[in-house]
Amino acid sequence: MAEIFLFVLVPLVFLAGLAAYLPFVPVIAALRALALVMQILTGYGRTLVGVVYRRTPEFRTLPPYRPQDERVKAYRNYFFGPAFRDLRQLLTLARRSSVTTVGDSFRAVTSRQFVAPAHHRALTVPYGLTLHLGLCAGTVLALLPVGLLVVLHALLIALLAGGARLLAGTLRAVDRAVLGMKRLHTGMLCPHCFERVPYPAYDCPSPTCRRRHADIRPGTYGVWRRRCECGQRMPTLLILMSRDARLQAYCVHPHCGKPMNTDAGHMPEVVIPLIGGQAAGKTQLMAAMLLALEHAAAGGGPAITLADEESDAEYQVLREVLRMRGHTRATQKTLPRAHSFVLGAGRSQRLVHLFDTAGERFVDRDDTDALRYARAARTFVFVLDPMAVKAFWTALEPPPGPLLDHTLGSTVDPEEVFARSVQAVAAMGAPLSRSRLAVAISKTDLLAEHGLAPAHPGDSDGARTWLRQALGLHSLVQAMELNFREVRFFHTAAVANEETGVDGSVTRFVEWCLRG
Ligand SMILES: Nc1nc2c(ncn2[C@@H]2O[C@H](COP(=O)(O)OP(=O)(O)OP(=O)(O)O)[C@@H](O)[C@H]2O)c(=O)[nH]1
Ligand SMILES: [Zn+2]
Ligand SMILES: [Zn+2]
Ligand SMILES: [Zn+2]
């Protein structure tokens, strides 16, 4: 009887139970599969938040982008590297966490239902098998949403990275166009080495940092702004610098690296070289030009601001010399430095560089290479001291009396200086045939004192005739008109007077020089 019970009834009951259980198998398996999928997705979500947002050490699998390792000591824009690093970290960590979740689930079922079950194995083994079936299905099913999320993530950052590059490119193009409008497409002039700087380098504005950023334009290190290694934010473009937050610009040429004018790049630039022999009157004329502009500004004309401390300090000295009717000292032969000032306001602002080079430099052929700045000039000033012309002392009618001091004159032949300078400047590639030349016949006040001034000192044609006929400078005038697009002749008296200010001749002269 016991045998019947054991070998017939029990199996029958078991099989009947199994048959009754069978319809529930798909339901239980499906639920376990769904639970596993949800578990894996939750893990993925947690990893995503950790990698992209919390950024704690346990979510780090790849070395981070650090500013100290960069060529430029600045933080990278998220879409220029870090976003892809995050995606790779996410893939690694998500794979790890999914494998752990699946493995743990299988192990839990095995141990609880097969190895150490709480009930009879006859009951737990079918249940365990069902769960295993669910886990298998869940593992396969989870691949779909996780894969989809990864693909979406990759697509999104690819799209944003493309957008960031496009935006950076557009901003650079806009900046280039604005520079083009300011006629700065070939760059700005470095007042120290006279080379063109296509785009200045800038120092971090933080006083404790001062790291140099060679190229701040939008790109790898930021689209609108960049962050220096020290944490300080800086604008990426000239057009993004507000008037009172302009960064200090530096020359990018490796042998130079000196500071440029703070206004460089923000306005058109005008370069005016003063050419002339020793003691022809270049320095004094330049001082008078600046003073004339200052007086004009006080009288409602365009505002003038000296662009840097050095220019300003030198100008203060020169102005004092003019006021005292003193004599300027011979300019040092050291490399000439621009006297820079900002003229005008708003859109008509211009950064003007006047180059007063020592007359010595125009005599020696080896020294003329310092005239590199002339390449950027479209208006030249030639200072001609009539007292340096032989005919002035021999052929003038009436002749200069004995009272006119010889030593006040230059002793360098203007024809020679002109020929040499033109040759040097043309060899450097300055487009003279497209440039204007202002000829300043200097020291008119001295001549006037001795009754030697021409009848119509304010008239270019009169001055030209005077040079040709009275001083016999036919060939010099011809050479000037041959080399330059436009030549204007001025008699200038670089002297000032407390009440009336600078002599009117200089006012007219400077006005023409800056008109171009
Ligand atoms: N009266 C008078 N003196 C002038 C005038 N221009 C220059 N001088 C004087 O002429 C001398 C030479 O003038 P500078 O301006 O120093 O000459 P420079 O061309 O700069 O000479 P270097 O620097 O040696 O190349 C100085 O003593 C000036 O005071 C002028 O228009 N009128
Ligand atoms: Zn430089
Ligand atoms: Zn910094
Ligand atoms: Zn001088």
Image: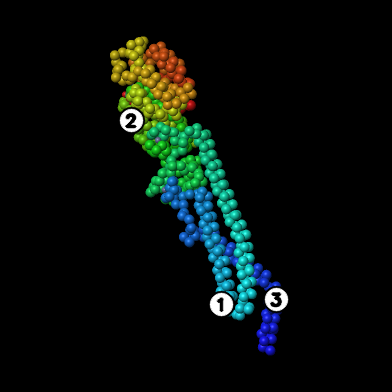
Label 2 beta carbon within 8 A of ligand 1 = no
Report helix, strand or loop for mark 1. loop
Task: Give amino acid for label 2.
Answer: Thr
Q: CA distance from mark 1 to mark 2?
A: 96 Å
Residue topped by disc 1 = 116
Task: Determine whether label 3 and label 2 are within 8 Å by CB.
Answer: no
Residue 414: x and y in percent read: 37, 18
Say whether residue 176 is visible.
yes
Q: Quick one: 508 or 30, which is closer to the camera?
A: 30
Observer-nearest residue: 138 or 278?
138
Name the residue: 61% across, 73% down: 128
Residue ID at (42%, 46%): 204
Compared across the picture, whether 125 is left or right of 218 comes to right
Labelled disc at residue 19? 3
What colour-coding does the image apply? rainbow
Judged from the image, the secondary structure of the residue bearing numbered disc 2 is loop
* Label 3: how many Cα within 10 Å (few below 14, some 14–19, many 20+): few
C-alpha distance separating marks 3 and 2: 107 Å
Which comes before the other along the chain, label 3 or label 2? 3
Of callouts 3 and 1, the N-terminal one: 3
Residue 8 pos. (x, y %): 69, 83
Residue 334's label in the rendered image is: 2
